[in-house]
Image (spheres, grey):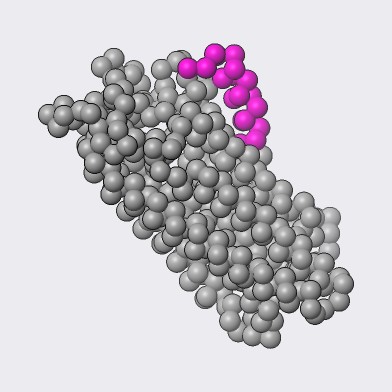
């Protein structure tokens, strides 16, 4: 699509208000995702060559975990149900963000022009998937708490029906949050033009283009960060603290080792996810550098999702055994309730 020659950036706004008068506020006919279009072509091609294998490996790893959790009966336990759901969310997250980012490396300078509806859809899907993942990690912590701290009641408590209800609640919560945030941002008038200084339609990068008073939208964004980051992380830390106390107090050395590996893997993923999200979004617009945010996005879009399959599979005997059985080189086995990475 040809980029309209009339697109211009807004003059620098104040912390909460644009310098444009209301008579000059116009809705952009399209947004232009700048990405790294200003970088030298050789460097953009190099980044494409480096990031494409990471994208394919991330997609393959998450789809492999999802496939094994579905087809192998030994993995039909609540822990692997949630792990398969997490992998599905990660695969969808990767598909929403990465292909357009990779395409931007190969396009001529000037950025990618997208319709406002396309920009809003990408933002909404990003928030929905990210929010669902935050809640899903909390559900996984609850599952591990019940499995290790309440083992006698675990089969009666963590039923298949409850697992599906928790998954549906996580997806519904992320979707409702995405609908609210996206609607709140796109109901604002935008300054003339729509140059998004990012690799996708991220919330802060689009919000800074808005005209008028942005206090409400910025407060909603910070409140969403509190709801999705601080509260689930507190629940996760409390759950795993209790789990560690129980692990250290009972059981044999082998059982403690398996349970500890499970907790360590889940905590590692939680720290990566919540750490990146907090660093990116739990800040006011006035303290942001979009150029820095754009560079950091290369990590949480390309590297962090790749680590999840590695963390959950490289040291996970159940997953390794399931893979061997699927390819026909293993013998049937079972996955214990508290066994894990």
Report the front residue among 58 and 32: 32
Q: Where is residue 250 in the image (x, y as percent from the top left)?
A: 80, 80
Does residue 106 lie above or below 330 as drawn?
above
Residue 162 in sight here? yes
Give left or right: position of 49 versus 8.
right
Does residue 275 lie above or below 18 as drawn?
below
Q: Inspect the magenta stretch and tell me whether residue 51 lies in it.
A: yes
Disc count in the image?
0
Q: Where is residue 194 in the image (x, y as percent from the top left)?
A: 31, 28
Majority secondary structure in the magenta region: helix
Q: Where is residue 243 in the image (x, y as percent from the top left)?
A: 69, 72
Residue with the most extreme right position: 253
Give the quarter of the figure containing the C terminus: bottom right
* Residue drawn at 35 percent across, 21 percent down: 1
* Residue drawn at 53 percent across, 36 percent down: 297
Residue 201 in sight here? no
Give left or right: position of 297 versus 83.
left
Q: What stretch is highlighted in magenta?
A: 38-56
* Residue drawn at 36 percent across, 58 percent down: 176
Give left or right: position of 153 versus 168.
right
Report the front residue among 189 and 66: 189
* Residue drawn at 43 percent across, 38 percent down: 287
Q: Inspect the magenta stretch and tell me whether residue 156 lies in it.
A: no
Does residue 127 lie above or below 35 as drawn?
below
């Amino acid at each position: 699509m040809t980029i309209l020659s009339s697109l211009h950036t807004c003059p620098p706004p104040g912390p909460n208000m644009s310098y444009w008068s209301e008579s000059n506020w116009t809705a952009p006919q399209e947004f232009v995702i700048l990405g790294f279009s200003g970088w030298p072509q050789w460097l953009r091609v190099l980044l494409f060559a480096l990031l494409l294998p990471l994208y394919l490996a991330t997609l393959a790893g998450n789809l492999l975990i999802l496939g094994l959790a579905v087809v192998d009966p030994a993995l039909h336990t609540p822990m692997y149900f949630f792990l398969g759901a997490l992998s599905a969310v990660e695969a969808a997250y990767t598909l929403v963000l990465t292909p357009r980012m990779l395409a931007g490396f190969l396009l001529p300078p000037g950025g990618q022009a997208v319709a406002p509806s396309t920009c809003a859809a990408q933002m909404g899907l990003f928030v929905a998937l990210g929010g669902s993942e935050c809640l899903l990690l909390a559900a996984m912590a609850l599952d591990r708490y019940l499995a290790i701290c309440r083992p006698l009641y675990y089969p009666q408590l963590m039923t298949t029906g409850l697992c599906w209800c928790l998954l549906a609640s996580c997806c519904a919560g992320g979707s409702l949050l995405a609908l609210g945030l996206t609607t709140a941002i796109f109901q604002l008038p935008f300054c003339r033009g729509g140059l998004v200084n990012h690799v996708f339609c991220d919330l802060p990068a689009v919000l800074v283009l808005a005209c008028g008073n942005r206090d409400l939208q910025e407060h909603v964004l910070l409140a969403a960060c509190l709801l999705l980051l601080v509260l689930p992380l507190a629940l996760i830390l409390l759950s795993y603290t209790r789990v560690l106390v129980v692990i250290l107090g009972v059981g044999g050395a082998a059982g403690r080792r398996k349970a500890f590996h499970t907790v360590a893997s889940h905590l590692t993923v939680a720290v990566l996810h919540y750490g990146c999200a907090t660093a990116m979004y739990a800040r006011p617009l006035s303290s942001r550098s979009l150029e820095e945010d754009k560079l950091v996005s290369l990590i949480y879009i390309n590297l962090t999702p790749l680590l999840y399959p590695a963390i959950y599979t490289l040291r996970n005997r159940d997953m390794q055994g399931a893979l061997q059985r699927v390819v026909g080189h293993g013998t049937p086995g079972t996955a214990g309730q508290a066994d894990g990475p």
